[in-house]
C-alpha cells in the first residue's frame, strides 16, 4: 500500500464501529438501527433535503460526523472514504458486520479497506491518490460494487444515452446507469444530469448509502424517457443550427457549396474535411447572417482519415445541436439529414439507417437511405430525438439506390477545441504518374495554359493572373498565399527545399524519388511554372539501365532468368494497360533510355507479329521483345 499522511480530523470524517453479526446473511435486514440520532449536528437542519438521509445513515452506523456536533455536509468525500463506505455496505449486507480489519504496521488507516475491496473485486486496481476528492464517476464505479448485482434490481427505465452528460460510450456509463435504474442515483435536475467530473459532498454520499441499504428509499420518478419527435419538430429544433458554406479555391474562384452545423453556442461547428480542403470558406447561417471577414471562420482541428473538420465561427448565442451517441445507432432506425444539396440551403430529408457500421477502406461509416448530394457534405444526420448522430459525408454514384454515408458523431468528440496548431487542408490530387507531387492547379484553382511531357518530368504553366478578389483577400494576396500554402503542403508531405531564388515564393523541393520546381513570370509570359519530375530508378544488376517495371508501374514476373551470359526480365503488360496507353508509355520509356545515353540500333517484327527493339549503351545490348500480352527484356554485356 502507498503511504500517505493524513490528519486526525480527516480520519474522523468517517468514524465506523464494529458490530456483532446480524441474524440474516446476504440480506437488507442486516442493516438496522445501531446508533441513536438526537439532532446533535448543528449544521444539519431538519429542513435540509438531506436531513433524513444523514439521520438514517448515522443510525445504521454507516457514517458519523467529523465531531460530536458537526457533520460538515458540504465537505467533499475522498477516494479512501468512498472505498470504506463501499466495504462497510458490502460486509454488513453479506455478514451483518464490518470485517475485522487491522491496519498493518506502518500502514495507512484505509489500507485494510483497500485490500478488502481488491479481494472482493469492488475496485479493479489501486488508485494513485486515496486522499484526493472522489469524482462522481468514481463514486458510481466504487459503490455500484457495494452490493451484489442482483440486489440492485432495475425499478425504472433509463434508456442508454438518456442521462444528458453520460453517453453510453463513456467508460463509467455502466455503473452510472445501473445505479440510476436501481433508483439510487437521480441526478441534479429534472433531466437527470449527473455531472460525472465533479466532486461529491458528504450530504450526497449519505443519501446514496441509505438508498443502497434501504430499497424503500430508492427513487422511482421517471428519468430520461425520451419522446421521439415528429419531422416538423425535428425541423423546428434542428434546422437553425445547420448552415451553408460557400467554398472558394485559393485563387478566389467559387468552387461550390457545403454544409456544417454548430455544436456549441459559442460558435464551434463541424463540417467535412473535404469541404474545408477546398480553401476559403464563407458561412451563411439559418437566419441569413453572413460570416466572410478575417477570422470570421477559423479552422481549429481536423481528422483527415475520418473526413472531419472543427471550425470556429466568430460570435456567440448560436443555436446548436446536442451530440447523440453513434455507438447506439441501429439498423432500421429513423433518421433525418439537414444540409444544402446543390446549394439549396435548409433542405431536410428522411430515411433509415441502412447499415450502422459500414467499413470502407478501413474507415467506419453509418450507411443511410438518405440522398447525400454535392452541397450536403458536412451536414447533420439527426436521430428521432433531435440529436446529431453523424456528419453527412458522401454517396455512391451510379448505384441505382440511395446508398449514402455519414461519419459517426462519436468521432467528433476526439477533435480538440483547444488546438493552437495552424492547419492548411487540401485534397490529395497528384499529378499523373506521381505519388507525392500535389497538382498545383487543383490546389490553387488556377487555369492551365501549357503542358509539356518529357520522359522523367512534366512542365505545367498556369495563368498567373487567374486570381480574383474574394471574401477578405485581394487577388494579389491570394496569389502569394496560394504559393506559400503550396510550399507548406509540400514540406508536410516530406519534401525538402533544396534551392531557392531571391524570391521566397519560388524554389525547388525534393524527396528521395520525386522533385518539383516552382517559378513565376509576372511580366512577359505571365505564368506560374511548375515542373514535376521523377528521380530514375535502375536495375540492381545494371546500374545505368532504367528499371522498366518502375517506370511502367509493373511487377516483374518471377525472378530474372540467365541464359548463355544474358539476363532476361519478364512483365505482363496486359494486366496494367490497354494497348494504346501501353504504346504511349513504351515510347516515353524509350525516350528515357535515349536521354540516359542508350542508342536505338534498330527495330523489327517477327513472323509471329512480336515487336523487337534493340538498344545499346554502357557496353550493354538490350533487346525489348513485345508480344500481345508480355514484355521480355534480354540484356547481354558486350
Image (cartoon, rainbow, N blue to C red):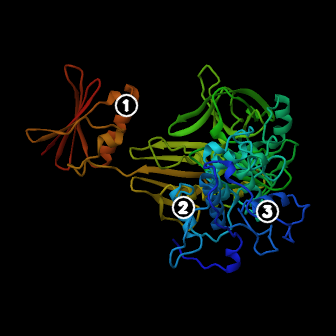
Residue 354, x across and y down, in percent = 63, 27
Whole-angstrom CA distance, mark 2 to mark 3, is 25 Å
Residue 445, x across and y down, in percent = 64, 45
Whole-angstrom CA distance, mark 2 to mark 1, is 68 Å
Please identify the quarter of the rendering in which residue 340 is found. top right
Please identify the quarter of the rendering in which residue 373 is found. top right
Q: Mark 3 or mark 2, which is nearer the start of the sequence?
A: 2
Q: In the image, is residue 141 above or below residue 359?
A: below
Q: Mark 1 or mark 2, which is nearer the start of the sequence?
A: 2
Q: Mark 1 or mark 3, which is nearer the start of the sequence?
A: 3
- Pointer 2: what residue? 116
Under tag 2, what secondary structure? helix
Under tag 3, what secondary structure? helix
Q: In the image, is residue 13 above or below residue 87?
A: below
How busy is the neighbourhood of tag 2: few (under 14 within 10 Å), some, or many (20 plus)? some
> Residue at the location (76% across, 61% down)?
59
> Residue at the location (54% across, 73% down)?
103
- Residue 396 — which label? none
Whole-angstrom CA distance, mark 3 to mark 1, is 75 Å
Under tag 1, what secondary structure? loop
Image side of residue 436 versus residue 413, left or right: left
Foreground of the two, 624 or 87: 87
Task: Find out whether the residues at labels 2 and 1 contact each other: C-beta distance under 8 Å.
Answer: no
- Pointer 1: what residue? 576
Foreground of the two, 423 or 205: 205
- Pointer 3: what residue? 203
* Mark closer to the observer (3, 1): 3
Task: Find out whether the residues at labels 3 and 1 contact each other: C-beta distance under 8 Å.
Answer: no
Specify whether residue 249 is in view.
no
Residue 153, x across and y down, in percent = 68, 41
Residue 573, x across and y down, in percent = 32, 30
Image side of residue 31 versus residue 541, left or right: right
Amino acid at each position: 500500500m502507498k503511504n500517505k499522511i493524513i490528519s486526525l480530523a480527516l480520519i474522523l470524517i468517517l468514524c465506523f464501529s464494529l458490530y456483532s453479526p446480524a441474524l440474516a446473511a446476504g440480506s437488507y435486514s442486516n442493516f438496522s438501527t445501531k446508533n441513536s440520532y438526537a439532532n446533535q449536528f448543528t449544521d444539519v437542519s431538519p429542513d435540509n433535503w438531506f436531513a433524513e438521509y444523514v439521520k438514517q445513515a448515522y443510525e445504521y452506523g454507516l457514517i458519523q460526523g467529523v465531531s460530536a456536533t458537526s457533520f460538515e455536509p458540504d465537505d467533499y468525500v475522498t477516494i479512501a472514504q468512498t472505498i470504506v463506505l463501499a466495504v462497510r455496505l458490502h460486509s454488513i449486507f453479506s455478514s451483518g458486520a464490518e470485517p475485522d480489519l487491522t491496519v498493518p504496521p506502518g500502514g495507512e488507516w484505509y489500507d485494510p479497506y483497500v485490500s478488502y475491496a481488491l479481494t472482493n473485486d469492488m475496485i479493479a486496481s489501486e488508485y494513485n491518490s486515496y486522499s484526493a476528492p472522489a469524482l462522481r464517476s468514481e463514486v458510481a464505479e466504487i459503490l455500484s460494487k457495494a452490493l451484489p448485482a442482483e440486489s440492485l434490481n432495475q425499478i425504472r427505465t433509463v434508456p442508454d444515452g438518456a442521462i444528458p452528460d453520460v453517453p453510453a460510450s463513456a467508460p463509467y456509463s455502466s455503473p452510472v446507469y445501473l445505479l440510476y435504474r436501481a433508483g439510487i442515483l437521480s441526478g441534479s435536475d429534472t433531466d437527470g444530469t449527473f455531472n460525472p467530473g465533479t466532486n461529491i459532498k458528504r450530504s450526497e454520499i449519505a443519501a446514496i448509502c441509505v438508498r443502497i441499504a434501504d430499497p424503500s428509499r430508492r427513487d422511482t420518478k421517471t428519468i430520461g424517457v425520451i419522446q421521439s419527435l415528429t419531422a416538423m419538430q425535428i425541423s423546428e429544433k434542428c434546422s437553425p443550427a445547420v448552415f451553408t458554406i460557400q467554398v472558394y479555391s485559393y485563387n478566389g474562384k467559387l468552387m461550390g457549396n457545403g454544409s456544417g452545423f454548430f455544436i456549441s453556442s459559442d460558435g464551434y461547428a463541424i463540417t467535412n474535411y473535404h469541404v474545408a480542403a477546398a480553401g476559403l470558406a464563407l458561412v451563411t447561417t439559418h437566419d441569413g447572417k453572413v460570416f466572410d471577414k478575417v477570422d470570421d471562420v477559423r479552422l481549429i482541428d481536423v481528422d483527415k482519415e475520418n473526413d472531419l473538420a472543427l471550425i470556429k465561427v466568430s460570435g456567440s448565442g448560436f443555436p446548436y445541436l446536442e451530440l447523440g451517441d453513434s455507438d447506439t445507432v441501429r439498423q432500421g432506425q429513423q433518421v433525418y439529414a439537414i444540409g444544402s444539396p446543390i446549394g439549396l440551403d435548409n433542405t431536410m430529408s428522411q430515411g433509415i439507417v441502412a447499415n450502422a457500421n459500414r467499413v470502407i477502406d478501413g474507415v467506419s461509416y453509418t450507411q443511410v437511405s438518405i440522398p447525400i448530394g454535392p452541397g450536403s457534405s458536412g451536414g447533420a444526420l439527426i436521430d428521432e430525438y433531435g440529436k446529431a448522430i453523424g456528419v453527412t459525408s458522401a454517396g455512391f454514384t451510379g448505384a441505382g439506390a440511395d446508398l449514402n454515408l455519414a461519419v459517426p458523431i462519436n468521432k467528433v468528440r476526439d477533435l480538440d477545441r483547444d488546438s493552437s496548431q495552424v492547419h492548411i487542408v487540401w485534397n490529395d490530387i497528384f499529378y499523373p504518374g506521381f505519388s507525392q507531387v500535389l497538382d498545383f492547379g487543383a490546389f490553387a484553382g488556377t487555369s492551365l495554359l501549357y503542358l509539356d511531357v518529357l520522359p522523367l518530368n512534366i512542365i505545367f504553366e498556369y495563368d498567373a493572373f487567374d486570381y480574383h478578389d474574394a471574401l477578405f483577400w485581394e487577388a494579389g494576396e491570394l496569389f502569394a498565399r496560394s504559393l506559400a500554402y503550396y510550399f507548406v503542403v509540400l514540406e508536410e508531405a516530406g519534401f525538402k527545399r533544396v534551392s531557392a531564388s531571391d524570391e521566397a515564393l519560388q524554389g525547388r523541393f525534393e524527396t528521395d524519388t520525386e522533385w518539383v520546381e516552382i517559378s513565376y513570370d509576372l511580366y512577359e509570359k505571365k505564368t506560374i511554372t511548375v515542373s514535376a519530375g521523377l528521380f530514375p530508378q535502375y536495375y540492381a544488376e545494371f546500374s545505368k539501365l532504367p528499371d522498366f517495371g518502375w517506370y511502367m508501374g509493373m511487377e516483374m514476373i518471377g525472378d530474372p532468368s540467365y541464359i548463355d551470359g544474358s539476363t532476361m526480365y519478364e512483365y505482363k503488360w496486359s494486366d496494367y494497360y490497354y494497348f494504346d496507353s501501353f504504346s504511349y508509355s513504351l515510347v516515353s520509356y524509350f525516350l528515357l533510355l535515349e536521354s540516359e545515353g542508350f542508342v536505338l540500333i534498330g527495330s523489327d517484327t517477327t513472323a509471329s507479329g512480336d515487336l523487337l527493339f534493340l538498344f545499346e549503351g554502357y557496353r550493354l545490348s538490350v533487346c525489348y521483345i513485345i508480344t500481345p500480352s508480355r514484355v521480355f527484356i534480354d540484356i547481354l554485356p558486350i
